[in-house]
Amino acid sequence: MSKAITFSAYGAPEVLRLSEVTTPEPGPGQVRIRVRAASVNPLDLKIRSGLMAKAAPARFPVIPGLDAAGVVDAVGEGADAAVGDEVLGAAVGGSYGEYALLDRPVAKPPALSWEVAASLVTVGQTAFRVLRQLGAKEGQTLLVHGAGGSVGTVAVQLAAARGITVVGTVGEHDIERVTALGATAVRYGDGWVERVRAAAPQGVDVVFDASGAGVLADSVALTGDSARVITIADMSAAQHGVRFSAGSTDPADESLTQLVRRAPAGELDLPVWRAYPLHQAAAAHGDIEARRNRGKAVLLP
């Protein structure tokens, strides 16, 4: 037996409880890690609150969490890691616990902190995937809504490194930071369209909406084509003819390996706002729902 955060009914952060659970055993190709850090993602909050209940009904009790980093302590047949390896990856069956299972572990460089290692997985792969789907090329202009958030932060840096001109909508407190990452940062809110046009007089080629802030109609108007806009956060996408990007990563995808190489080399910055003890998972969810965070929140078992 081991400890993990669970919930047995949809609801507010307070439904999260520290519980005794059966320690998971790795199946073929899997590894079990002793978790050193687990990332808290917005999707965790949507699942816990019941917003995803129609699309993916929960089987209670649920151990939340998508990402983890830790030390391998057991391996399944054919697993691509050994006991004692430091790894990170997407968790199978939840990551908010002392132990987690990973299907496709990626080696963690010694210079990469546990907190950043856990934080990179979902947000990094999401940013990588959407940029690939948009097909943005060197010399084009990309607009990133929510450029101050974790996914937006990674997308800005990946795009700028490819020679793409990036404009990002952000809160006032994020203008300086996002500008330093290689984007032209403009304040979101009323008048954002005019501010974007002023920042990009050459026009906007493609749009990545990571904000879900009701910006799709104007984004389509800016590009002139709904096929040039992708959102990961606005459930009204279909009403605007916009693609909603979601889903798991292809097993052959090497994006996480590439991201892990960039971070210790100083080529990728992902701010970790706060680390919480595992038993304070409800506080972490509450802080994110109240938009108090300025970067990733992680749990430390």
Image (spheres, rainbow, N blue to C red):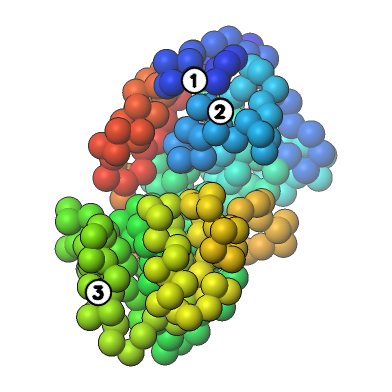
Asked whether disc 1 touches disc 2, contact meaning CB atoms under 8 Å apart, the reply is yes
Residue 50's tag is: 2
Asked whether disc 3 touches disc 2, contact meaning CB atoms under 8 Å apart, the reply is no
Identify the element where label 1 is drawn.
loop
Estimate the spatial distance between the alpha carbons at disc 1 and disc 3, rounded to whole Å.
39 Å
Q: Nearer the viewer, residue 206 or 90?
A: 206
Kind of residue at disc 1: Gly
Identify the element where label 2 is drawn.
loop
Can the viewer see residue 156 in this picture?
A: yes
Image quadrant assignment for residue 132: bottom right
Residue 11's tag is: 1
Identify the element where label 3 is drawn.
helix
Q: Which residue is mark 3?
A: 194
Estimate the spatial distance between the alpha carbons at disc 1 and disc 2, rounded to whole Å.
7 Å
Query: Where does residue 279 sit, x and y in percent of width and height?
Result: 41, 17
Residue that appears at 34% across and 61% down? 147
The numbered mark, 3 or 2, whose residue comes first in the sequence reads 2
The numbered mark, 1 or 2, whose residue comes first in the sequence reads 1
In the shown orientation, is residue 118 left or right of residue 59?
left
In the shown orientation, is residue 276 left or right of residue 31?
left
Can the viewer see residue 111 in this picture?
A: no
